[in-house]
Image (tube, grey):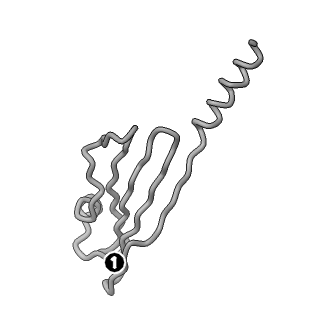
Amino acid sequence: MKNLMKILVAGLFIVSMASCSVSGPLFITDNPDGGKVGESSYRVIFGFILDGGDASIKSAAENGSITKVSTVDTKVEAGLFVTRYITVVTGE
C-alpha cells in the first residue's frame, strides 16, 4: 500500500510539472520593425483571472514604448492548473 501511495504521489508530481506552450502570429502591418518589443499578459487559475486580466495590444505597445506597431503575436502557456496568455508586440 505504501508503494502505491509513493507511485501516485510521484505520478501527480510529474503530471503537475508538465505544460504546453502554443504561439502564433495575430497580424502583421507594413510598418518597419524598429527593434522594440512589448509584452502584456495575464494568468488564469481554475478559470479565475489574476494579474488584472490585461493582455491587450494597447498595453503591450505601451509596455514597450511602441507608437507604430509592426507585428502582434500571441502565446498561450498552459500548465495543469495555471494558464498564461501573452501578447507580444514589435515595432518602433
Seen as rendered, the residue at the extreme top is: 2
**Image quarter of the C terminus:** bottom left
Instruction: Identify the residue shown where x is 36% and y is 76%.
Output: 27
Give residue 49's position: percent from left, percent from top: 31, 43
Looking at the image, residue 27 lies above or below residue 75: below
- How crowded pointer 1 is (Cα within 10 Å; few <14, some 14-19, many 20+) is rated as many
Q: Is residue 84 left or right of residue 15?
A: left
In this rendered view, identify the residue nearer to me: 31 or 54: 54
Secondary element at tag 1: strand
**Image quarter of the N terminus:** top right
List the residue tagged with mark 1: 70
Instruction: Identify the residue shown where x is 74% and y is 12%.
Output: 2
Give residue 36's position: percent from left, percent from top: 34, 68
Q: Amino acid at mark 1?
A: Ser
In this rendered view, identify the residue nearer to me: 59 or 67: 59
Q: Quadrant of residue 44?
A: top left
Query: How many marks overall?
Result: 1
Instruction: Identify the residue shown where x is 68% and y is 27%.
Output: 10
Give residue 26's position: percent from left, percent from top: 38, 72
In this rendered view, identify the residue nearer to me: 74 or 39: 74
